[in-house]
Amino acid sequence: MGTRVWGDNCSIRGRAVSHLEIPNYDLEVKIRSGRRMWVSVSTLVYENVRNHRRLIVHFAHDTTEEKKNNEVLRKVRDLSRQLASIPDLVGRPAPVSPLSEQEREILQMFSIGRNSTDIARKLGITLQTLRNHLHHINQKLHTHNRLEAVTHAIQRKLV
């Protein structure tokens, strides 16, 4: 990206010289336009067997949107936990019947921010089957939607 990322005292350069592993890292950078962006940096060290010189190559991948999405997800999780900690003044009836292990797993995945497509893929089921599970969960918990079911499950410590 046209930015010098290390100098003579660079720890990455030192690790390359010492043949140590170089971990990937995230870095916020300012690009030529003045805009700031987040990049995930991976490093490749190439050693020329003929002259024994090392070439250090940094690969930078833009992760700005991912960082923003993770921050939004963190805020939603925090808000969900705050909502779950509010005492239910009306009181909810206990589940009519216990949740199955798969229903608990589905609620757990929704509670950490996974989307329907990811959950269905992970469980090896179709989206329609996942919707059927959600319908049964809502019936058992006396809830009306996914968010309410997750909040109720967190309150009751079901997930």
Image (cartoon, helix red, strand yellow):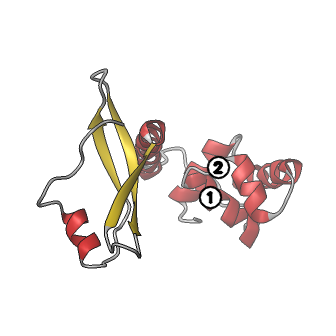
Q: Position of residue 14 (x, y in %)?
A: 20, 69
- The image shows residue 140, relative to residue 127, as above or below, that is below
Q: Position of residue 140 (x, y in %)?
A: 75, 57
- The image shows residue 128, relative to residue 158, as above or below, that is above
Q: Which residue is mark 2?
A: 149
- Residue 82 as seen in the image, left or right of residue 94: left
Q: Residues within 10 Å of mark 2 (few under 14, many from 20)?
A: many
Q: Tag on residue 109?
A: 1
Q: Position of residue 78 (x, y in %)?
A: 40, 47
- Taking the view exactly as shown, the residue that stands out farthest to the bottom is 19
Work out whether residue 84 can be spotted. yes
- The image shows residue 77, relative to residue 16, as above or below, that is above
Q: Which is nearer the N-term, disc 1 or disc 2?
A: 1
Q: Nearer the viewer, residue 100 or 96?
A: 100
Q: Residue at x 77, y 57 (%)?
A: 121
Q: Nearer the viewer, residue 56 or 21?
A: 56
As helix, strand or loop, the secondary structure at mark 1 comes to helix
